[in-house]
Structures are given as C-alpha cells and as structure tokens.
Image (tube, grey):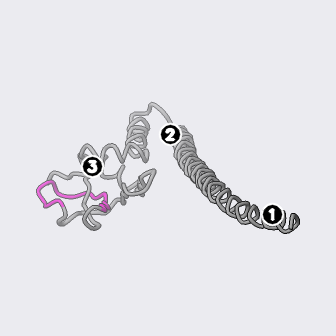
Amino acid sequence: MPVKIRLQRHGKKGKPYYWIVAADARSKRDGKYLEKLGAYNPNTNPATVELDVDGAVKWLQNGAQPTDTAKNLLSYKGALLKNHLVGGVRKGALTEEQAEAKFTAWLEEKTSKVQAKADGLSEADAKAKAEALAAEKAVNEARIAAAAPVVEEEVAEEAAPAVEAEASNEEE
C-alpha cells in the first residue's frame, strides 16, 4: 500500500483550510486517511502551519512520499531536516544530541524569521493607517478652509451696507 503525505481540503468556497494527512495514494483527495499530521491555513499572513513533526518523520522513515505542496510545508516546519538528521544518526555520522542541537538551532532561527515578518507586516499596517489618517485630516482641513472664507465674505457684505447706512445718517 503506497502511502502519501498530502493535503486534504476543508473550509468553504474561497476560504480553503487544509489538513496534512498520511493517506493511501489510491484514496480520494478528501477521503479516508491513515493519520492526521497537522493543519495548514493559507488565509492568514504569514500562512499558519501546525504540524506534528515527529509523526511526519515517522511516516517519512516508513517510506511515505510527500506531494509537492506537502513537501514544501514539511520543509517549512523542519520535518525534512529532522528526517535527514535522524538518517545521519542511524548511519553514525553524528550523535542524537548533536542532531537535536542542530534541529533546535534551526527551529529558533526559523521562528525568529517568521516573527520578524509578522512584526514587519503589523508595522507596515500601522504605518499605512497613520498615513491614511494624516491624509484624511488634510482633506478635512482643506474642506474647512474652503468653507470658512465664504462665511467671512457674507459677514463682510452685511457689514458694508450697515457702515454705509451709518455714514448716510451722519451726513443728514
């Protein structure tokens, strides 16, 4: 029975949400699966990937073949790296502690990169909101300034006949 690690689509139309599953290659896309390994939500920025790394490594060790997208997600979360390191431990190239140290160092670096991207996106969003607010204030001030001289001219026009009337009264 050939096993594939692939995505199983859930969610509604236009809002996909995927489960990462180990399934028989002959089963339907959204059909029966052997084990659920995680979830993938492409609707968020950055995309949210939850993965049982140890479970994925177990399936990879047993010969499961990931699809292209699943392979990218496994690589993103470090399952392929951990599989590679486990193979090195099995061959005697490095010890279990060295492999675990390399994996945790990679994982910390990856989480810092993801956090930096999320911070950059929130910073850009805050900057865009501030610029929009400044532009809106400028438009409102221009509108107020355009409306204000009209009121002053009307007041000046009303005052001019009153001054003329007082001048004519004084002459009489």
Does residue 97 appear in the picture of this structure?
Answer: no
Percent coordinates x, y for residue 142 in the rendering: 62, 52
Q: Which residue is mark 3?
A: 62
For disc 3, the neighbor class at 10 Å (few under 14, some 14 to 19, many from 20) is: few
Check disc 3 and report its element: helix, strand or loop: loop
Of mark 2 and mark 1, the one earlier in the sequence is 2
In the structure shown, which secondary structural element does the residue marked by tag 2 occupy? helix
The amino acid sitting under disc 2 is Ala
Q: Residue 130 location, x and y as percent?
A: 62, 52
Asked if residue 27 lies in the magenta stretch, the reply is: yes
Region in magenta = 15-29
Task: Identify the residue position indicated by label 1 in the image.
Answer: 163
**Residue at image x 21%, y 58%?**
23
Q: Pick the quarter of the image with the N terminus.
A: bottom left
Q: Is residue 157 left or right of residue 95?
A: right
Which percent across, then down, holds residue 4? 21, 51
Gap between marks 2 and 1 measured at Cα: 95 Å
- Residue at x 52%, y 46% (from the top left corner): 114
Mark pair 1, 3: CA separation: 101 Å
Residue 135 in the image, given as x and y percentages of width and height:
59, 50
Closer mark to the observer between disc 1 and disc 3: 1
Tell me, for residue 130, which label it has, or none. Answer: none
Q: Quadrant of residue 163?
A: bottom right
Q: Which quadrant: the C terminus?
A: bottom right
Amino acid residing under circle 3: Asn
Q: Is 91 above or below relative to 40?
A: above
Q: Can residue 56 be seen at all in this image of the molecule?
A: yes
Nearer to the camera, 47 or 21: 47
Tag 2 residue: 99
Q: Residue furthest front?
A: 172
Q: Mark 1 or 3 closer to N-term? A: 3
Mark 1 residue type: Val
